[in-house]
């Protein structure tokens, strides 16, 4: 077990060293969330002005900007379409067979191979958000809430990789999986709280949405950081996040094994 863990760590460190040679990639990853926040935030600030309200869905102007930045940098951790494209190509062409004979399980190999740039950019971005929060005069989460926030972010990353690898695994049965990815991103953008905080919805709908896996990708960690939840509410939602993570990874692993049976039977 230690030997296998060491192999994946070596993969991660090697990719980290390689990618640090191209610092422009990391810089662009850091700039994009600010640009996206400026675009979406400006529309919401107009809404605040038109309604004449200081609080919409539990967010002030200040906390809403912080929320947007937080979820944008959490989204940076996502492997994105590149991971799906790589899996799709290797499964369709039969090149996966070369991966299978190597002394490393394909799924964690792919995870650690794709993680370095999101890891560096995401961590740096969340530090920047914390600094900006202080500069804007807002309060950072207390120690307990900050711990829950960290646990929530890790759960979010775990879910993101499960979803993207799950879509890629469908390449065993579907020749072109990118329409599925585009559909997922459209649904996720609305139901995760990425575009509209879930507290904007009617109370009953908001409560239901917060316990679906989509909310774990943005609204829950963003809500914890900006103080939308009490400690008890945040704890329950983090437990829900990790429950979904366990369920989705169980489905991913099971589906991957079924896909391998089909792949090996057809010889790639």
Image: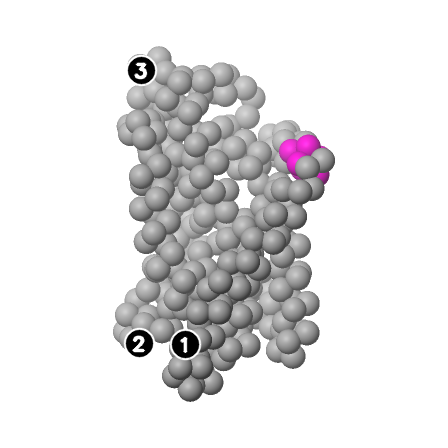
Q: Earlier in the sequence, mark 1 or mark 2?
A: 1
Percent of width and height locating residue 206: 33, 70
Q: Nearer the viewer, mark 1 or mark 3?
A: 1
Q: Give SS at disc 3.
A: helix
Q: Which residue matches tag 1? A: 47
Q: Quick check: marks 1 and 2 in contact, CB under 8 Å?
A: no
Percent of width and height locating residue 218: 45, 60
Name the residue rendered at 42%, 48% in the picture. 246
Q: Nearer the viewer, mark 1 or mark 2?
A: 1
Measured in 3D between alpha carbons, the distance from the residue under mark 2 to the one under mark 3, in whole angstroms, is 51 Å
Q: Is residue 126 magenta?
A: no
The magenta region covers 15-20
Which quadrant of the structure image shows residue 13? top right
Which quadrant of the structure image shows residue 176? top left
Percent of width and height locating residue 163: 40, 44
Q: Earlier in the sequence, mark 2 or mark 3?
A: 2
Relative to 214, say whether 56 is above or below. below
Predominant secondary structure, magenta span: helix
Measured in 3D between alpha carbons, the distance from the residue under mark 1 to the one under mark 2, in whole angstroms, is 20 Å
Relative to 94, say whether 85 is above or below. below
Measured in 3D between alpha carbons, the distance from the residue under mark 1 to the one under mark 3, in whole angstroms, is 57 Å
Q: Is residue 19 magenta?
A: yes
Q: Which residue matches tag 3? A: 265
């Amino acid at each position: 077990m230690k030997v296998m863990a060491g192999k994946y760590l070596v993969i991660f460190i090697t990719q980290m060293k390689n990618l640090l040679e191209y610092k422009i990639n990391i810089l662009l990853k850091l700039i994009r969330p600010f640009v996206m926040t400026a675009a979406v935030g400006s529309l919401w600030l107009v809404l605040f002005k038109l309604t004449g309200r200081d609080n919409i869905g539990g967010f002030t102007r200040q906390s809403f900007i912080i929320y947007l930045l937080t979820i944008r940098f959490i989204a940076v951790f996502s492997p994105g379409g590149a991971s799906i494209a790589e899996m799709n190509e290797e499964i369709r062409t039969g090149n996966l067979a070369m991966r299978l004979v190597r002394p490393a399980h394909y799924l964690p190999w792919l995870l650690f191979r794709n993680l370095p740039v999101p890891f560096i950019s995401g961590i740096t971005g969340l530090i920047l958000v914390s600094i900006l929060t202080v500069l804007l005069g807002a309060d950072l989460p207390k120690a307990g809430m900050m711990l829950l926030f960290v646990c929530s972010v890790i759960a979010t990353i775990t879910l993101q990789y499960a979803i993207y690898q799950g879509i890629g695994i469908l390449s065993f049965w579907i020749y072109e999986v990118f329409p599925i990815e585009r559909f997922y991103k459209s649904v996720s953008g609305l139901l995760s709280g990425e575009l509209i905080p879930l507290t904007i919805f009617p109370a009953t709908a908001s409560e239901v949405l917060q316990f679906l896996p989509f909310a774990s990708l943005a609204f829950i960690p963003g809500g914890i950081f900006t103080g939308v939840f009490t400690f008890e509410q945040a704890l329950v939602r983090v437990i829900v996040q990790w429950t979904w993570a366990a369920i989705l990874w169980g489905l991913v692993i099971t589906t991957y094994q079924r896909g391998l049976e089909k792949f090996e039977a057809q010889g790639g």
